Image (cartoon, rainbow, N blue to C red):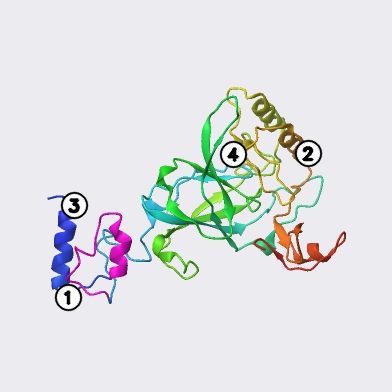
Amino acid sequence: MRLMSRVRLIAGMLCLAGWRVTAEAAQVCDDSGLFTLQNLASCTDSDSFALDNLACTDSDVFALDNRAVAPSEPDKTRFISFSVSITREVAIRVKLTSLHHVEPPYTGGASVPFTALEGQVRWVGPPMQYVESVSSGVQFHASQLQCAPYYQDWSTVALLHVTGAEIVPSSIYDVEVLAALCQGNEPNCTAVSSPLQIKTTRWGDVETPYNPPVSDTQPDTSDISALVNKFKSALGAPIKARALLAGDSSGAIDISPDFNFTHISLCADAFKGLPYPYKPGKCTGDAAKACISDSDCSNAPNPTTGPCILCP
């Protein structure tokens, strides 16, 4: 007997025996083919039901196999990369767990963690198709982080690269997948996957060995050489998601243009020990003024009002 037939038979028997399945849980499971409202027509909707993880409730609908999948070790400094295989509309939430905790510290400037911005969440925006270079024509998909949730079927994107002003070096992010029924109630919704933790490398560290997991000072000359090869479009050069470093005043990266020398220059500065140059926050009194703390807003030049926020 096929698995689906067994599940339906067991569910029907349990319903007749007095077990109950919620309509809400049935709707969540509907797209995965486990249970449908039609299968459970004789059941009431006052309680939830689970059967050896074949049926699902709000709390575990996206756990385990349905969470995002990413490389086991960090290999990018300004992007995080993962795939989502679930074949229905979901939103991807990125929690800013630990931002810019540099170890060992920069040798040519202050190593200031962005603690005021930690704990906030951002959402992965619509995926766009880009090319590695005009000459190569090699395509890839990338998204920018945004303030509002965005729902779609992400399984059509084999591998997604995500960047934004909030994706900074030496940081930790927790990536979660939210079911469509969370729409409009994301802060309180429990139909959420278990988190996938992704780390970024040290500033300018685009080539092995990566920090982390190694603890020595990076980048080194091999990182600069790798970016020179990217500029030349040489075979074996790093992909854009590893190579792009430069951004606007807040650090947001424009993915579209061909790789240019600005990124190599920043890697050379990082090799000299200079700190990460961008601040991802915006002052409420002047959104053009970048910040990582409220004091950045009131300080000269051009003092304005805080607080320092990510979404004006």
Q: Which residue is mark 3?
A: 3
- Quadrant in which the C terminus is drawn: bottom right
Which element carries disc 4, helix, strand or loop? helix
Q: Residues within 10 Å of mark 2 (few under 14, many from 20)?
A: some
Q: Which residue lies at the image location 40% right of the left edge and 60% below the top edge?
A: 179
Q: Quadrant of residue 73?
A: top right
Q: Which residue is mark 2?
A: 269
291 relative to 23, above or below: above
Q: Which residue is mark 4?
A: 241
Looking at this view, is 170 or 162 the one in front?
162
What amino acid is found at the position of numbered circle 1 in the picture? Gly
What amino acid is found at the position of numbered circle 2 in the picture? Asp
Circle 4/circle 2 CB separation < 8 Å:
no
What amino acid is found at the position of numbered circle 4 in the picture? Ala
What is the spatial separation of the Cα atoms under label 1 and label 3, in whole angstroms? 23 Å
Horizontally, residue 118 falls left or right of residue 184, namely right
Mark found first going from the N terminus, 2 or 3: 3
Is residue 108 magenta-colored?
no
Mark found first going from the N terminus, 2 or 1: 1
Q: Which residue lies at the image location 44% right of the left edge and 68% below the top edge?
A: 189
Q: Which residue is mark 1?
A: 18
What is the spatial separation of the Cα atoms under label 4 and label 2, in whole angstroms? 19 Å
What is the spatial separation of the Cα atoms under label 2 and label 3, in whole angstroms? 59 Å
Q: Quadrant of residue 240?
A: top right
Horizontally, residue 103 falls left or right of residue 300, namely left
Magenta range: 23-45
Tell me which secondary structure the magenta stretch mostly adopts: loop
